[in-house]
Amino acid sequence: MLPLEAIELNAFRRRHEGDTFWCGLLLGGRGVQLTTKLYTDRACHFAHHPGAELGVRCEGRAARTVAP
């Protein structure tokens, strides 16, 4: 689960430095790589990795999952 607060997201990034994250195809995602977005004025979240093929829109927030 991605932390919503910026200070917690920094710790999450350190813990998962070598991990990759992907949209979950089974949950309506597109199967492209995700990155974390750090915000101090709103909730931090996953976003599609810059340069990802963005031809089809994800079906919702539940589409984002962590790949082992």
Image (spheres, rainbow, N blue to C red):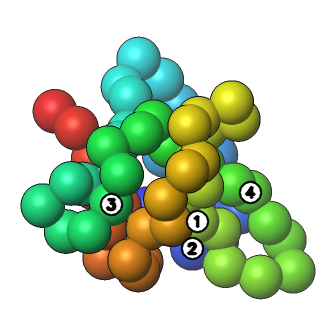
Instruction: Kindly identify which residue carries mark 2.
Output: 4
What amino acid is at disc 2? Leu
Q: Earlier in the sequence, mark 3 or mark 2?
A: 2
Q: Label 2's element?
A: loop
Instruction: Kindly identify which residue carries mark 3.
Output: 29
**Tags 2 and 4 touching, CB below 8 Å:** no
Q: Earlier in the sequence, mark 3 or mark 4?
A: 3
Mark 2–mark 4 Cα distance, whole angstroms, equals 9 Å
Instruction: Kindly identify which residue carries mark 1.
Output: 45
What amino acid is at disc 3? Gly
Q: Earlier in the sequence, mark 1 or mark 2?
A: 2
Q: Residues within 10 Å of mark 1 (few under 14, many from 20)?
A: many
**Tags 1 and 2 touching, CB below 8 Å:** yes
Residue 17 location, x and y as percent? Answer: 48, 23
What amino acid is at disc 4? Leu
Mark 3–mark 2 Cα distance, whole angstroms, equals 21 Å
- Check the image and report above or below for 15 versus 27: above
Residue 40 location, x and y as percent? Answer: 84, 71
Query: Which image quarter holds the N terminus?
Result: bottom left
Residue 9 location, x and y as percent? Answer: 59, 54
Mark 1–mark 4 Cα distance, whole angstroms, equals 7 Å
Task: Name the residue rendered at 80%, 66% in the picture.
Answer: 39
Task: Name the residue rendered at 26%, 68% in the picture.
Answer: 28
